[in-house]
Image (cartoon, rainbow, N blue to C red):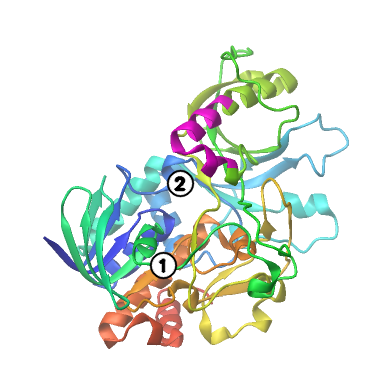
Amino acid sequence: MLSCQLAVIGAGSAGCGAALAASRLGIDTVLVENYPRIGGISTFAGVNCYEPVAGATGISRLLFEEMRRNDPAGVGIYRMARHCAVPAGDEPPFPGAEQRINPAGRYEDTLCSHVEEREPRKAFLLRSGVIFEPELFCRTVEGMLAGSGCCRIRTGVAPAALDCRDGVLRRMVLTDGTRLEAARWIDCSGAVAAQCGCRMLFGREASGRFGESGAPKFPEPVLNGVSQIFRIRPAAGDAVEPLPAACWWAAQFPAACFTEYPNGDFNCNMLPTMSGLEFYALGTDAAQAELKRRVYAYWHYLQTGFPEFRRFRLHHIFPRPGCRDGYRVLCRGMLTERDILGGLGRQKRDEIIALCDHPLDFHGRGGGGRSGSLYGIPYHSLVPAGMKNLLVAGRMAGFSALAASSCRLSRTMLQLGEAAGTAAYLSLERREDFPVLPPGVVRELLRAGGVEL
């Protein structure tokens, strides 16, 4: 038997944020992760390039500072160098966006997604973000959790069976047979909420469901695109690497984002590699085989069509796909397109527990568009309908499909996790269930911890 005050299921960005927040507040926490190491898509899928976004303060900033202290050469601030949409007159063609390390960059430079600038090229070139080595992220978070003295990590296991009655999750059995009991739970995987009987959402909702003008008239099985990220490394001489058999898959290849690591390697992210629905329809094994096949084809396309890539070699294909979309949980409060387009000025400020300014952004079918406004994510988007002692944090939280396309960034998920971990502490301290916990007290404690709201 394993008992604790708080169990966090899923150790991706949101789960790490939740465990860090709760354990630093002295809550006895167990963090459960199906993969052999924590970090989720930031470590196993290569999504270790944090895009610019508002609100990434609190634990997000602290984590950056700790990574830099642990290994200054393992984390850096990047800045946009060139973009195919706004080329300079003397630049050769380039297949997407290039982002390079800016030695003078500051973390504060990464806290704004949109830049007010009349000239599109200047606006693009002012965008900054964070890139880090995946192993450094793991070591840093694990060290911070160990330093709290309040968190136990269980990797390589997942929920197998639950005891949930009348909206109260009491215990679960893990895949290794361990029984886990907790007073409060945070689901950062979606699996717990689904097994508890929470209503799940998948694909784009009809416009009438949440009053969204940009949604389709009828529900559509459309998901945001999936990326298979790979890493390239500088080489001594020019060469085109051999193409494995049967790898051509597209008459026209997508653009990609190429972000420089501090050591000179590049993180390469096709936008996207596969549609989200195709990924789910193929199943995990077949989809991963096809994604790898497309990486080889894309790399050959880059080397044959753009001579500068002949100075690099394919170094690593990350083992896990980068999924931007999937099942979501119906919550007591749902973030919608209206919140994003209306901005913070039209929302109830006393409900807001995280900020974001990323645009509505679909990769693949559906396109996207920049909102140009700062908006907030409300506390009740973390509270599943019908549950009393369970929160959800991560991409499966209470978002419409359109809203999820905007608020899905990793540092925003870290912020949601921090809010959920903070709410768990307050729920235990005040002996109040999550649905009746006042959002204002969560906001107050978050701000005391350095979260800017």
Q: Main secondary structure of the magenta part?
A: helix
Residue placed under numbered mark 2 in the picture: 41
Cβ atoms at labels 1 and 2 below 8 Å apart: no
Nearest to N terminus: mark 1 or mark 2: 2
Q: Measured along the vertical axis of the image, is residue 357 above or below residue 452?
A: above
Residue 214 on the magenta segment: no
- Of helix, strand and loop, which one carries label 1? strand
Q: Is residue 265 visible?
A: no
Is 88 or 406 nearer to us in this picture? 406
3D distance between C-alphas at marks 1 and 2: 18 Å
Q: Which disc number belongs to residue 392? A: 1
Q: Residue at x 24, y 72 (%)?
A: 26
Task: Identify residue type, mark 2.
Answer: Ile
Q: Measured along the vertical axis of the image, is residue 65 above or below residue 281?
A: below
Is 10 or 236 nearer to us in this picture? 10
Residue 279 on the magenta segment: yes
Q: Residue at x 80, y 43 (%)?
A: 85
Task: Identify residue type, mark 1.
Answer: Val
- Of helix, strand and loop, which one carries label 2? helix
Q: Quadrant of the C terminus?
A: bottom right
Q: Which disc number belongs to residue 167? A: none
Between disc 1 and disc 2, the foreground one is 1
Q: Is residue 204 left or right of residue 332?
A: right
Q: Quadrant of the N terminus?
A: bottom left
